[in-house]
Image (cartoon, grey):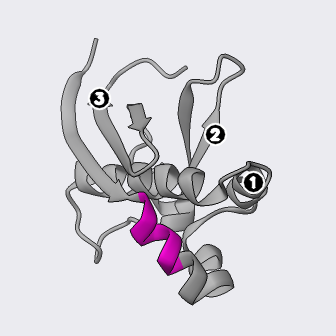
Amino acid sequence: MGAIQGVGVDVVDVQRLKKVLEQQGAYFVGKVFTDAELAYCQSKKNPHEHFAARFAAKEAVAKAMRTGWSGAFRWRDVEVVNEPSGAPKLILYREVAEALANSQLHLSMSHTENTVVAFVVIEKGGEKD
């Protein structure tokens, strides 16, 4: 078992994110979400709820990395997918993947109709899935 390198949590107001999606549309989605996340969220009955969950997870990763926005973190370098069981999983790309190459990330998300929370633990030296 590895040592905890960072912990991050984020809470998102679902209706607030829905307004951002309505106002900024393709610009916001293209800046923050991967093509796979876009396809997944848009396939759902209430896409804004799923976008909010993924946004919260990405924010939680950024907080757990503790590098700030000037560091290695880029929105689209963090992707949230679902395991066959439905459990959320993080896939990392480019600079974020390099920065966390010897780490395992653990993600937990929960949401209601109005609020999403995401919690991330970065474990240094943890075994990869």
Asked if disc 2 and disc 3 are in contact, CB closer than 8 Å, the reply is: no
Q: Residue at x 40, y 34 (%)?
A: 110
User: Picture coordinates of residue 1 (x, y %)?
Assistant: 28, 11
Q: Amino acid at mark 1?
A: Ala
Q: CA distance from mark 2 to mark 3?
A: 19 Å
The residue under label 2 is 81
Q: Is 117 on the left or on the right of 35, as rendered? A: left
Q: What secondary structure do most residues of the magenta stretch adopt?
A: helix
Q: Earlier in the sequence, mark 1 or mark 2?
A: 1
> Is label 3 in a helix, a strand or a loop?
strand
User: Picture coordinates of residue 23 (x, y %)?
Assistant: 55, 88
User: Picture coordinates of residue 54 (x, y %)?
Assistant: 51, 52
> Is label 1 in a helix, a strand or a loop?
helix
Q: Amino acid at mark 3?
A: Glu
Q: Earlier in the sequence, mark 1 or mark 3?
A: 1
The residue under label 1 is 36
Q: Amino acid at mark 2?
A: Val
Examine the structure image and report whether residue 19 is included in the region drawn in magenta: yes
Residue neighbourhood size for the residue with mark 2, other residues' Cα within 10 Å, grouped as few (<14), some (14–19), many (≥20): some
Residue 74 can be seen in this image: no
The residue under label 3 is 123
Asked if disc 1 and disc 3 are in contact, CB closer than 8 Å, the reply is: no
Examine the structure image and report whether residue 18 is included in the region drawn in magenta: yes
Q: Earlier in the sequence, mark 2 or mark 3?
A: 2
* Highlighted magenta segment, given as a residue range: 14-20
